[in-house]
């Protein structure tokens, strides 16, 4: 045992240990250690030689790591890969499989993680209802690259008030995410753009730290793994297809190629420039998988409104529909769900962002006629009406 395996931070002594993991390997831990135990084990002279720091800091870097910064001990963990020129065909095939037609953007994402760890990046959500898609392999690949700076969380970890075990990590990954409560999703979104965060551990005071953590989530639920609103720009959702084969040694092959991959990332030129707070321009990372989740997160009232108006448009072959709130309420009486006036107003004004005509004008709308069968009859009315287009509604339904 040497003094370098112990440190004193402030007035507290810590023992540096490598905690064994279930699947092999270990995780670096700092365990509080009593000065009396040190004295009993090694004598009082040993204590005086233990390295001393004024406090902790968290300064992430993978290419210029420093353990001590201005007498503070860096909590960010170094990675032990030594970049070396070479080939990485298995890593390339995995990235192509995960990101598909957005391969270059995926490489940008990984390059930014490696070279600019404090950069804000979108919440990456991988979805697929199929098995053997490589989602978990990708998470384990990220863990293999960034090692102790990646932590696997559960859904309940996001709801816990104690967060000291993950607040300083580069990546938080969740293998089976299901955050379908509004408060869960809001917390996740706020964390993804937060510059600072309050760290809280059991029995200790809360304190504020810089926050740069990114999130990578996986789910077998393609419809509503998280609540995503229509205007949301913080999520990058990729649907991952099933792998053609199941190579049980694939992860080991990936790990062997990491030094060559990091060397290549260090010399690669980014294909994008920063165009938003999450680096990528929102339109670049918008996918059909994201649109599917947004559609499935719409309220029953909004879906009924959308379907009812489209039914009128189809019957009369029109591209725009004019209405006042009472007109829609009358049409929605045909649905099985009771709809309140305020619910319609919230959808029209807050979600669809429609504004009424500046003054009361004559407009043509449609009402239900049950004789001899259900049809929609055109009527003229006067009021400050709203107007919605078929193209807009078809993006919602």
Image (cartoon, helix red, strand yellow):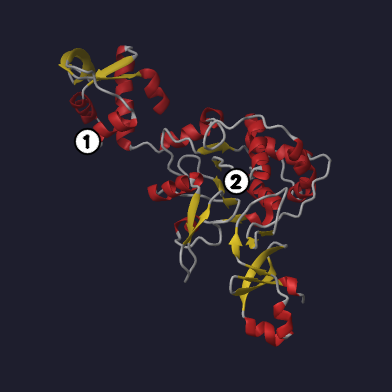
Q: Is residue 375 left or right of residue 88?
A: left
Of the pair 358 and 334, the residue shown nearer to us? 358
Quarter of image, res 55: bottom right
Is there any visible trace of residue 36 in the rendered image?
yes
Q: Is residue 110 left or right of residue 196?
A: right
Spot occupied by residue 305 in the image (x, y as percentages of width and height):
29, 28
Q: Which residue is mark 2?
A: 118
Query: Which residue corresponds to the image point at 45% horizontal and 60% vertical from the top-left?
Result: 160
Query: Which residue corresponds to the image point at 28% horizontal and 29% vertical from the top-left?
Result: 349
Q: State the SS at label 2.
A: loop
Above or below residue 195? Residue 321 is above
Spot occupied by residue 35 in the image (x, y as percentages of width and height):
63, 81
Mark 1 vs 2, N-terminal side: 2
3D distance between C-alphas at marks 1 and 2: 43 Å
**Quarter of the image that includes the N terminus:** bottom right
Quarter of image, res 38: bottom right
Q: Which residue is mark 1?
A: 342
Above or below residue 208? Residue 380 is above
**Quarter of the image that includes the C terminus:** top left
Above or below residue 306? Residue 218 is below
Residue 274 is marked as none
Q: Is residue 370 left or right of residue 233?
A: left
In this view, the mark in front (1 or 2): 2
Q: State the SS at label 1.
A: helix
Of the pair 216 and 67, the residue shown nearer to us? 67
Of the pair 278 and 303, the residue shown nearer to us? 278
Is there any visible trace of residue 339 in the rendered image?
no
Of the pair 158 and 224, the residue shown nearer to us? 158
């Amino acid at each position: 045992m040497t003094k370098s395996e112990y440190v004193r931070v402030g007035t507290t002594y810590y023992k540096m240990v490598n905690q064994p993991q279930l699947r092999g390997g270990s995780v670096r831990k700092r365990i509080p250690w009593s000065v009396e135990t040190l004295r009993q084990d090694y004598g009082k002279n040993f204590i005086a030689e233990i390295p001393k720091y004024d406090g902790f800091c968290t300064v992430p870097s993978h290419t210029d790591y420093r353990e001590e910064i201005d007498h503070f001990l860096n909590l960010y963990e170094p990675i032990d890969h030594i970049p070396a020129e070479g080939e990485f065909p298995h890593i390339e095939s995995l990235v192509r499989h995960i990101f598909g037609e957005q391969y270059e953007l995926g490489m940008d994402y990984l390059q930014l993680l490696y070279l600019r760890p404090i950069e804000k990046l979108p919440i990456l959500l991988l979805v697929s209802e199929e098995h053997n898609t490589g989602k978990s392999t990708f998470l384990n690949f990220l863990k293999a690259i960034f090692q102790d700076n990646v932590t696997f969380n559960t859904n309940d970890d996001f709801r816990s008030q104690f967060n000291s075990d993950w607040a300083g990590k580069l990546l938080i990954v969740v293998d089976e995410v299901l955050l379908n409560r509004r408060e869960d999703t809001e917390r996740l979104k706020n964390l993804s753009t937060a510059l600072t965060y309050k760290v809280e551990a059991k029995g200790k005071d809360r304190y504020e730290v810089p926050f740069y953590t990114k999130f990578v989530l996986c789910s077998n639920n393609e419809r509503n793994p998280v609540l995503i609103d229509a205007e949301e720009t913080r999520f990058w959702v990729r649907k991952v297809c099933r792998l053609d084969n199941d190579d049980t040694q694939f992860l080991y092959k990936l790990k062997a190629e990491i030094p060559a991959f990091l060397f290549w990332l260090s010399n690669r030129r980014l294909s994008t420039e920063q165009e938003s707070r999450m680096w990528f321009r929102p339109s670049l990372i918008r996918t059909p998988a994201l649109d599917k989740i947004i559609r499935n997160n719409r309220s029953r009232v909004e879906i009924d409104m959308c379907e009812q108006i489209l039914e009128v448009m189809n019957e009369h072959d029109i591209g725009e529909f004019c209405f006042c709130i009472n007109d829609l309420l009358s049409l929605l009486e045909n649905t099985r769900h009771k709809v309140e006036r305020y619910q319609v107003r919230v959808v029209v004004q807050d979600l669809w962002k429609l504004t009424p005509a500046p003054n009361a004008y004559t407009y043509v709308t449609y009402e239900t006629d049950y004789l001899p069968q259900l049809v929609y009859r055109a009527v003229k009315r006067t009021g400050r009406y709203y107007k919605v287009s078929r193209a807009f509604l078809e993006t919602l339904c």
